[in-house]
Image: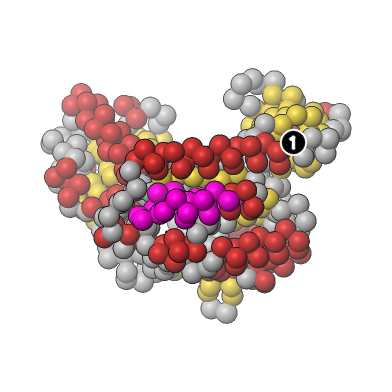
Amino acid sequence: MVTAVPRKPKTFHIVTYGCQMNDNDSEIMAGILQARGMTPVRDETDADLVIVNTCVVREGAEERAVGRLASMAAAKRQRPEMIIAVAGCMAQKDGERILERLPMADLVVGTRDLFKIGALVDTVATTGERIVSIQDVDKPVFLDAHPVQRKSGLKALVTVMYGCNNFCSFCIVPKTRGREVSRPLREVVGEVRQLADQGYREVMLLGQNVNSYRHGGADFADLLAAVNEVPGIERIRFITSHPKDCSDRLISAMRSLEKVCENIHLPVQAGSNRVLRRMKRFYTREHYLDLLARLREQVPGVTVTTDIIVGFPDETDADFEETYSLVETARWDSAFMFMYSPRAGTKAAEWIDSIPLELKKHRLQRCIGRQEQISGEINAGYVGQTMEVLVESTSRRSDQELMGRTRGDKCVIFPGPASLVGSLVQVRVTASHPHTLFGQLAVPVAVAAA
Ligand code: SAH
Ligand code: SF4
Ligand code: F3S
């Protein structure tokens, strides 16, 4: 497919798949493009430039991005001057091959080249050439501050470290994101200060392995302490923490720093030590449960969520039962559960994907079902309590209702005026569901809004 040239693109639209790192990368690309005078548009068919920021963590994620790109081919036939860019983890993984596989793509931008998006788009627009810009992810990068165009005006994503050194045997992320690089502490704090000045109340510190943050002499607990000092920020969250890097220093930071929310996402992946070893997770079930007990003891009210993979190569019935029993024992607040999906280039992909799809599905359903019950029981325990809620928006169902989150990241729906969006309010929980709490404002609106 040929891009008609030359024409300087004026509008853009970004479609994002995958994790919060990708969300933040899209915000960074949007910031760079807007700083160059381009305008975001809601509808991709109106855009001069469409960027699809891709995820390849499981086959399904990859298929969704490819499907979306394929559907854009029609829009491009109508408007041949439209530029289509493929960014993110698929771009990094497949590079040149994307141009062969996806004839509608004009530009392929790797995860470490997203900062060049503006210049790359200009080159495509002026030459009409198809370009691939990918760097070796294993090379250390120099990280610079860039303009960021955030989606939310309330909760800001702030990437504090890139990449992952863990090479869990099932996971493609170290291949698509490269080795760990942490941003200097001062730079992160500087960004958070600016965010506070712009009115943000909450920051979410991001890294594939965020609690292994290290820059100079500072570790992640030091970073939390420094961000905690920024006036105007009310809540600090972070994701994702690896159990092996969950130090006592981190636990005491969560306990003592008043802005750090009592919530942690702590992926366990499996309950069988044999499987954990083959996954290269570097902890045992016992170590994980001990960590959970210490967290719950030392951080009152902490909520803990997890990720689980079922159907890992050679997962026996006995292995699976250990994962199932861990769901019962750990009693996470919620869990993201996945069927194992082989990813070429990972260690586990060299092993036979031995568990039939039907068995994977069955195991997944059992774990999901049990977790739903547990999430329901835990949430029912909040009924009658009054909780601090940061109001994020009106609810999806009605503009008479608000949606907010507790410090433990529970979603709460309650009646109230849109004017409260952005405020911290007290809500008395009156009913619950496995994924949501429902309640009433505990103080009259006039007082709450004051
Ligand atoms: N950095 C995070 C999460 C990375 S990916 C961590 O260390 O846990 C998010 C989740 O996707 C993982 O926690 C894992 O549960 C799941 N995942 C990763 N690779 C997968 C694969 N090949 N098949 C199925 N699920 C996978
Ligand atoms: Fe993937 Fe493991 Fe790194 Fe998480 S810690 S990104 S699961 S390799
Ligand atoms: Fe997906 Fe890449 Fe994130 S593979 S989960 S978008 S790091």
Relative depth, front residue between 448 and 248: 248
Residue 277: image quadrant is: bottom left
Q: Residue 340: image x %, image y %?
A: 38, 49
Mark 1 Cβ inside 8 Å of ligand 1: no
- Image height of 435 relative to 29, above or below: above
Label 1 environment density (alpha carbons within 10 Å; few <14, some 14–19, many ≥20)? some
Relative depth, front residue between 167 and 8: 167
Which type of secondary structure does the marked residue at label 1 adopt? helix
Let me know if residue 312 is in the magenta part: yes
- Image height of 270 relative to 63, above or below: below
Q: Residue 217: image x %, image y %?
A: 57, 79
Q: Residue at x 71, y 47 (%)?
A: 407
Relative depth, front residue between 364 and 3: 364
Q: Residue at x 30, y 39 (%)?
A: 63
> Going by the image, does 230 lie left or right of 191?
right
> Going by the image, does 343 lie left or right of 301?
left
Tag 1 residue: 380
Task: State the colouring used for the structure image.
Answer: secondary structure
- Image height of 79 relative to 301, above or below: above
Res 135 seen here: yes
Q: Could you tell me the amino acid type at mark 1? A: Ala
Q: Residue at x 36, y 38 (%)?
A: 358
Relative depth, front residue between 16 and 379: 379
Q: Residue 293: image x %, image y %?
A: 70, 61
Magenta residues, start to end: 305-325
Residue at the bottom extreme of this rendering: 217
Residue 164: image quadrant is: bottom left
The quadrant of the rendering that contains the C terminus is top right
Res 391 seen here: no
